[in-house]
Amino acid sequence: MDKKKGFTLTKTMAKVVASFAADKAIEAYQNEKRIESQKSHDKRYQNTKLLLQNYKKFVAYRDNAIYDTSQIIESSTLICELMESNPVGNYEVESIKKNVAITHTMLEHIDEMLGVYKNRCLRSSKPEVQRRWRIIEALYLVEDDCSTADVAEKEFVTEKTVYNDLNKSYEELSELFFGIDFNDMLL
């Protein structure tokens, strides 16, 4: 009778294999967390850019949105007549009202964090940090539209420097706008 010979793991070998497998599993988990954290970071970074790029639009929306008849009664009787023959009723468009409230709250937070960032930059002894605030202000916050070329010329730097400063500002403002992701710190 032919007996098949099998391979038998010793306890030591089993421990080595288990340890190796556990290390690989931990490494895979940490890589997955790193990727997840990077995606989250990238999303916050992109959202910061979008918030700044659309800041003036948000302010205009917040300041000019009309969502109930009491706001339009003096300026437009036609709209009131369309809504009801007696325009005294207080009709509200809830979705617009909700969006105005959200935009108002969001802008209060953004304005507060921009103030924190401004103070941080302007108190810095480093000219490049002070310049970051001026770049953000010129490109996104003041009424006059400025291009990166205009800002570079005003600041006596290259456009590449403006973009580098913007990238650093987006990073710093992301933390202020959205908070610090403690998962990033733990990896």
Image (spheres, rainbow, N blue to C red):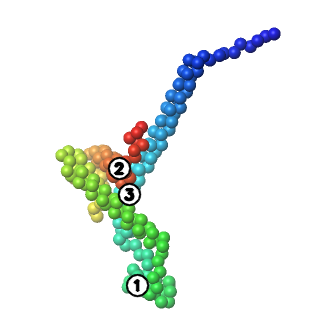
Is residue 33 something one can see in this rendering? yes
Amino acid type of the residue that numbered disc 1 sits on in the rendered structure: Ile
Residue located 51% across and 28% down the image: 23
- Location of residue 70 in the rendering, given as x and y in whole percent from the top left corner: 41, 82
* Furthest residue in direction bottom, as rendered: 86
Quadrant of the rendering where the C terminus is positioned: top left
Report the amino acid beneath label 3: Leu
Residue type (three-letter) at the residue carrying disc 2? Glu
At 43% across and 75% down in the image, what residue appears? 67
Residue 137 is left or right of residue 31, and the answer is left
**Residue 76 picture quarter:** bottom left
Dots 1, 3 in contact, CB < 8 A: no
The answer for how far apart the CA atoms under marks 3 and 2 are is 13 Å
Q: Observer-nearest residue: 49 or 118?
A: 118
Q: Earlier in the sequence, mark 3 or mark 2?
A: 3
Question: Which of the numbered marks, if any, corresponds to residue 73?
Answer: 1
Toward the viewer: 24 or 111? 24
**Which residue is labeled 3 in the image?**
51
Q: Real-space Cα distance between discs 1 and 3?
A: 33 Å
Q: Secondary structure at mark 3?
A: helix
